[in-house]
Image: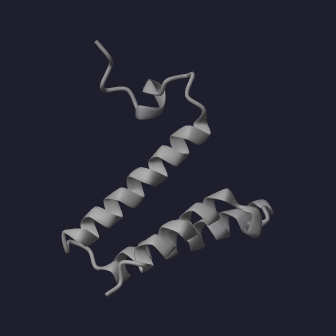
């Protein structure tokens, strides 16, 4: 039986590339945001603010690392989530 007390990172399949894990996590977060908006638990504007905060935080980290923000896959993916959520506005 699997050890359910170990951190998720310790239970991750060693054959699964880290990039796949990151992409999966982003899809989960996007689905969660859309679900909360659909159930009126979270407004679209609040969901967009959450995504914008994530983009700004990532931009700050990338700036500190000297990474080119315009080439960031993370910022690109978050921007796509932002666009997707913005399409829900009534």
Q: Quadrant of residue 58?
A: bottom right
Residue at the image position 27 percent from the left and 63 percent from the top = 35
**Quarter of the N terminus within the rendering:** top left
Pick the front one: 75 or 63: 75
| Extreme residue in the top direction | 1
Q: Is residue 2 left or right of residue 16?
A: left
Residue at the image position 37 percent from the left and 74 percent from the top = 47
Q: Is residue 70 left or right of residue 60?
A: right
51 lies above or below 21? below
77 lies above or below 1? below
Expressed as whole percent of the image width and height from the top left, the position of residue 44 reads 33, 79
In this figure, what is the number of numbered marks?
0
Expressed as whole percent of the image width and height from the top left, the position of residue 65 reads 76, 59
Q: Is residue 85 visible?
A: yes
| Extreme residue in the bottom direction | 90
Pick the front one: 53 or 47: 47
Q: Is residue 51 visible?
A: no
Expressed as whole percent of the image width and height from the top left, the position of residue 23 reads 53, 47
Q: Quadrant of residue 15?
A: top right
């Amino acid at each position: 039986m699997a050890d359910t007390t170990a951190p998720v990172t310790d239970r991750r399949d060693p054959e699964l590339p880290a990039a796949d894990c990151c992409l999966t996590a982003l899809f989960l977060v996007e689905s969660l945001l859309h679900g909360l908006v659909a159930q009126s638990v979270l407004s679209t504007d609040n969901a967009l603010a959450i995504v914008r905060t994530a983009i700004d935080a990532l931009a700050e980290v990338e700036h500190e690392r000297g990474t080119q923000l315009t080439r960031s896959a993370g910022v690109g993916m978050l921007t796509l989530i932002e666009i997707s959520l913005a399409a829900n506005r009534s």
